[in-house]
Amino acid sequence: MEDTELVQTGIGLLASVYRLRRNLRDGNDESGSSGYPELLEGAFDFTMTADMNVPAEHVADVQHIVNQAVDQLAHRQEAVMRGLLMGFVKVVEAYEEEQPEPDVLEVLQQLSLEVATAPPED
């Protein structure tokens, strides 16, 4: 995935969490799921090559260490993401208390479109 798609995935997560929270608050029987698995499909996939000269007998050890590091990083990223999503929900709740009937989903959709059409960052 390219950076723009990853940013849009993040925005989609916000919209998904908002929609789920709103449905639960309104007592909607069809509250659905958070949508995390679908939205994150491929977001954290990556490939890497080891261009260094690793003796064949140590390749498995190097791969194991790299996998452990990546797993720890992914866990930390997930925790940060949960914090961001929780913060988003609190901000939206405060916003809704001040302005009845805000169209949060429309704001997020517009942001996603802006990201898609923005010139690439250097």
Image: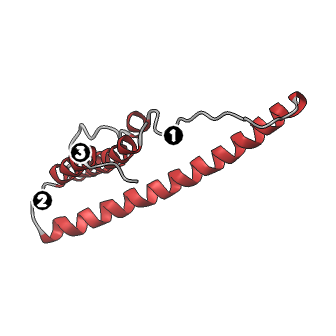
Q: Is residue 79 left or right of residue 12?
A: right
The image quarter containing residue 101 is: bottom left
Q: Earlier in the sequence, mark 2 or mark 1?
A: 1
Considering depth in this image, is 116 or 78 the residue closer to the camera?
116
Which is nearer the N-term, disc 2 or disc 3? 2
> From mark 1 to mark 3, how far is it between C-alphas?
23 Å
Alpha carbons under labels 2 and 1: distance apart: 32 Å
| Residue at the disc numbered 3 | 117
Residue at point 53% right, 52% down? Answer: 77
Q: Element at badge 2?
A: loop
Q: Which disc number belongs to residue 102?
A: 2
Q: Residue 98: x, y in percent?
A: 14, 71
Q: Please, what is the three-letter code of the amino acid marked with disc 3?
A: Thr
Q: Quadrant of residue 12?
A: top left
Which residue occupies 44% across, 60% down? 83
Distance from the alpha carbon under mark 2 to that under mark 3: 24 Å
Question: Foreground mark, 2 or 1?
Answer: 1
Crowdedness of circle 2 by 10 Å Cα count: few (<14), some, many (20+)? few
**Residue 20: where, in percent of width, then height?**
28, 46
Colour scheme in use: secondary structure
**73 sits to left or right of 91:** right
Q: Amino acid at mark 1?
A: Phe
In front: mark 1 or mark 3? 3
Q: Is residue 103 above or below residue 43?
A: below
Q: Which residue is under mark 1?
A: 44
Q: Quadrant of the C terminus?
A: bottom left
